[in-house]
Image (tube, rainbow, N blue to C red):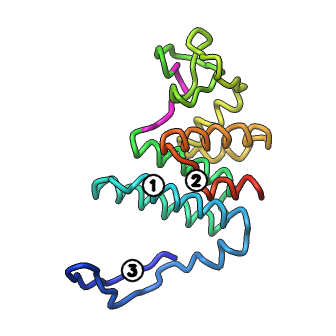
Amino acid sequence: MHSRVQLVPRRNLDIIVQTETIHPYGTMLTNDYDSFGAASAMVETAEQLTRDEDIASAAEHYRLLHGAIAALARRAAAPKALLASYLLRALAIAGWAPTFDECSKCGLQGHHNWLSVPLGGVVCDDCAPPQATYAPDDVVALLAALLAGDWPAIEGAQNGEIRQATNFVAQYLQYHLEKTLQSLSVIDQG
């Protein structure tokens, strides 16, 4: 739910004195397993990323989260694509934006096809560590589109490309959070 809440500050715990529902997203999201799972992962991610954030950064995370939940509720795109885009953008706000247009280790411009979670995106052939994953050009372009929110480019992606891109995004998120999100494991089961 997107709600407006009026609080009265108290010594240990604020008291809610008035609430107003602005957008009732609950029913729209709970009627679809994938949308509900994506929304749960978004909320869990926002909670983890904003624990120690300043007010300005938390406000930016809030606006991103609200926009993503609203897009899920109106079925603007596939839930997994919305989730992957949200996760990449949330990581960028937190200071962990991956690189998809140059080698994330040496900075060599151009198309590179190795994905490295620890190095932060694509790496060139010379910098690719042994555990790097090969990604075709279409997957790298999809990851860049997800980060930028380029929905026309995202909508043309094939299922295999989406699967590889979302796997990288999930690994990248969990690497930076240093923990496994329960909601992401539920999405993989669906």
Report the predominant secondary structure element of the magenta stretch: loop
Front position in the image: 14 or 68: 14
* Residue picked out by circle 1: 48
Tag 2's secondary structure?
loop
Tag 3's secondary structure?
strand
Mark whose residue sits in front, 3 or 2: 2
Instruction: Choose the circle earlier in sequence order: 3 or 1.
Output: 3
Which portion, as a residue range, is magenta? 96-103
Tag 2–tag 1 contact (CB < 8 Å): yes
* Residue picked out by circle 2: 181
For image coordinates 54% across by 51% down, the residue present is 86
The image's mark for residue 4 is 3
Tag count in the figure?
Answer: 3
Residue 99 painted magenta: yes
For image coordinates 61% across by 57% down, the residue present is 182
From this view, report whether residue 30 is shown above or below residue 58.
below
Q: Quote the CA–CA distance across marks 3 and 2.
A: 28 Å
Residue 80 painted magenta: no
Q: Position of residue 146 (x, y in %)?
A: 59, 43
Q: Quote the CA–CA distance across marks 2 and 1.
A: 9 Å
From this view, report whether residue 1 is shown above or below residue 150.
below
